[in-house]
Image (cartoon, rainbow, N blue to C red):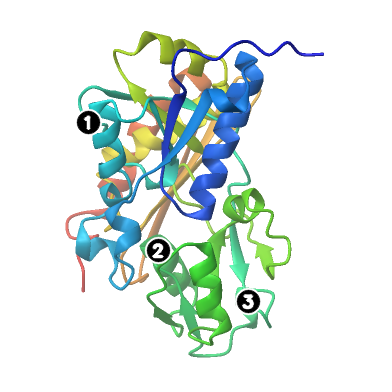
Amino acid sequence: MTMILPCPASPLKIGTRGSPLALAQAYETRSRLMQALELAEECFAIVVIKVTGDAIQDRPLKDIGGKGLFTREIEEDLLSGKIDIAVHSMKDMPTIQPEGLLLDTYLPREDVRDAFISPSLSALADLAQGAVVGTSSLRRKAQLLNRRPDLNVVEFRGNVQTRLKKLADGVAECTFLASAGLNRLNMDDVPATPINAEDMLPAVAQGAIGIERRADDASVAEMLSKIHHTPTGHQLAAERAFLLHLDGSCETPIAGLATLDGDQLFLRGEVLRPDGSEAIKGEKRGPIADGPAMGIALAQELLGRAGDGFFDWH
């Protein structure tokens, strides 16, 4: 029987967005910390923080400020000491953290694939000419239009539940969600078909949970070191270096995925014109330790092949 240790003087405050998926990720973080530190549930407090990205649902992210809208308020509370750690979906995270914060703890990565969601169809190929597809992701939109320029892609923002309701209401014939989110929410009843990464390369860091902390908080750093998943850290080091050197944001269709094989890392990347009219792909292989350098090299290669104006809006 595992011995439960007494709680610290005050509970560790875990900051998170309030969506069901964000809460599921915070609960997973708490559970892993409870097990690793042999502490009871009451030693932790989940603190829900309202963020601008969740409050504004009727406009594309690129029109209201991009990825930072899901993190800014949480990071402000972390810097001020209102919370001790912050739990994030890594694909929502800007590549540079505010001064004083560190993002160096990752939980084991979930399924990285996108999922095709439709109540009546099972694959993209089943969509009729000119079918309406809902997605808020510029990457998915560009990838879809690259393969099927006939499709009518409409804005489809909101959390998992909101998007599924829009689908049920007939706003679109299908949408796409991250398989990881569906798995973490145990949504086995959703009509989802995973798409191989070879057919639709996922967003950088898709399926990964990151835990952010204050850089000078040594006790929290020690706690988090006990739940860090090193292989996921290696994958994200390569992927986020790739994204950083592409100047990736919510306004840029970029996909990337690193996989591990023994002591080797395989990195694939893709950049697309926003209208899907062109896609440029590349890959690198090498030792895991070279992952970040491979990410930079792949970004430079794709930028060189893309040329000026590739990401301009039409």
In the image, residue 116 above or below residue 112: below
Nearer to me, 47 or 205 = 47
Q: Position of residue 283 (x, y in %)?
A: 47, 41
Nearer to me, 227 or 122 = 227
The reply to whether residue 1 is in sight is yes
Q: Residue at x 65, y 15 (%)?
A: 38
SS category of the residue bearing label 1: loop
Q: Residue at x 54, y 79 (%)?
A: 167
Cβ–Cβ below 8 Å for labels 3 and 2?
no
Q: Position of residue 41 (x, y in %)?
A: 60, 27
SS category of the residue bearing label 3: loop
Q: Which residue is mark 1?
A: 98
Residue 169, numbered circle: none
Q: CA distance from mark 1 to mark 3?
A: 39 Å
Mark 1 residue type:
Pro
Q: Which corner quadrant of the image does residue 78 belong to?
A: top left
SS category of the residue bearing label 2: loop
Q: Position of residue 171 (x, y in %)?
A: 48, 85
Q: CA distance from mark 1 to mark 2?
A: 25 Å
Closer to viewer: mark 1 or mark 2: 1
Tally of numbered tags: 3
Mark 2 residue type:
Ser
Q: Which residue is mark 2?
A: 137
Looking at marks 1 and 2 on the same chain, the residue that comes earlier in the sequence is marked by 1
Q: Which residue is mark 3?
A: 118
Name the quarter where the N terminus is drawn.
top right
Looking at marks 3 and 2 on the same chain, the residue that comes earlier in the sequence is marked by 3
Looking at marks 1 and 3 on the same chain, the residue that comes earlier in the sequence is marked by 1
In the image, residue 75 above or below residue 217: below
